[in-house]
Image (spheres, helix red, strand yellow):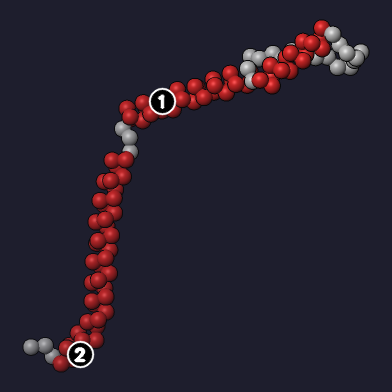
Amino acid sequence: MPLPEIEEILAKYKDEEEKVDDLFKQIEKQDDAKDEGDEGQKSKFLSYEEAKERNKAILRDLETVKGNLRSKAIFSPTEMQWERICKRYQEEPALPVTTWRCNMPIFV
């Protein structure tokens, strides 16, 4: 049988102890959820071989896109029109221009 002074102290701090216990339970739940989340995230990471294949595919797609952009830049309709205009001007210049020359563009 506890002493009355001890009972008073226990009653006084009982609410605070319950709050602390609730906080501990919440922290444990969060840690458990975090651990489960870590396992889920680990499955999202690719293995070395999967990453290697993905990177090769990305580089292949990049080269394809770069090639498409080059071909569009070289054979664009406006570029072809300017080439025709330059050829016509070189064949029959309408005005005598000495400071400007129409040079055909060189593509590499």
In the displayed structure, 34 sits above or below 94; it is below
* Residue drawn at x 20%, y 90% as measured from the top left: 8
Closer to the camera in the image, 96 or 47: 96
* Residue 103 at least partly seen: no
Say which residue label 1 marks: 57
In the displayed structure, 32 sits above or below 51; it is below
Q: Is residue 61 left or right of residue 84?
A: left
Question: Within the image, what quadrant is residue 28 found in?
Answer: bottom left
Question: Within the image, what quadrant is residue 31 found in?
Answer: bottom left
Q: What's under tag 1, amino acid-wise?
A: Ala
* Residue drawn at x 20%, y 86% as measured from the top left: 11
> Residue 46 in the image: x percent, y percent?
33, 35
Return the disc, 1 or 2, that comes first in the chain's sequence: 2
Circle count: 2
Say which residue label 2 marks: 8
Q: What is the spatial separation of the Cα atoms under label 1 and label 2, in whole angstroms?
A: 73 Å
Question: Within the image, what quadrant is residue 83 found in?
Answer: top right
* Residue drawn at x 66%, y 20% as measured from the top left: 77
Identify the image quadrant of the C terminus. top right
Q: Secondary structure at mark 1?
A: helix
